[in-house]
Amino acid sequence: MKEKPARDAMMGKQLRIVLIDDEPDLRKLVERTLQFIAGWDVASAPDGESGIELVRSHQPNAAIVDLMMPGMDGFEVARRLKQDPSTAHIPVVLLTARTEIDQARLEASGADGVVFKPFEPEALAAQIAECCGEPDA
């Protein structure tokens, strides 16, 4: 796996990321991807409610939120994070396997980006870095 270019471009800043996804295997994959490729600190939650609390307590540089989760979907998680003054400044990136996304719901959620599954590890790290304002990503 070629990890050096993306890692070199993103090593300037140690980012803190919160991942919210109901699938344990995908959480582990994304956590390890961002830790290995970019050297970032990643905390994760299995659902929207605990994820929102994790974002509030950790104040990460970005939140990655699965779009399709039971209970509270990614649109709602993003909307709540963007409406909360303590988390509104945190970029939210939705992660989805859907090929089409409801643009009105996307805009209403306030999400800052979308990553489509399957994703290339370097592309995921680069998009998150871009949402966080990392110029070299």
Image (spheres, rainbow, N blue to C red):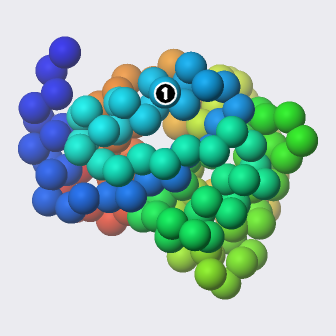
Q: Position of residue 21 (x, y in %)?
A: 65, 36
Could you tell me the amino acid type at mark 1? Lys
Looking at the image, is 23 positioned above or below residue 72? Answer: above
Locate residue 135: give its quadrant.
bottom left
Residue at 74% across / 75% down in the picture? 83
Residue at 55% across / 44% down in the picture? 44
Q: Position of residue 35 (x, y in %)?
A: 30, 38
Q: Residue furthest right?
A: 71
Q: Position of residue 48 (x, y in %)?
A: 76, 49
Residue at 72% across / 78% down in the picture? 84
Q: In the shown orientation, is residue 56 left or right of residue 15? A: right
**Res. 40 visible in picture:** yes
Q: Position of residue 72 (x, y in %)?
A: 85, 46
Q: Which residue is mark 1?
A: 28
Locate residue 20: give its quadrant.
top right
Q: Nearer the viewer, residue 104 or 50?
A: 50
Q: Residue furthest top?
A: 1
**Res. 94 visible in picture:** no
Looking at the image, is 29 positioned above or below residue 71? Answer: above
Locate residue 57: give its quadrant.
bottom right
Looking at the image, is 7 positioned above or below residue 32? Answer: below
Q: Nearer the viewer, residue 108 or 45?
A: 45
Residue at 69% across / 39% down in the picture? 46
- Quadrant housing the N terminus: top left
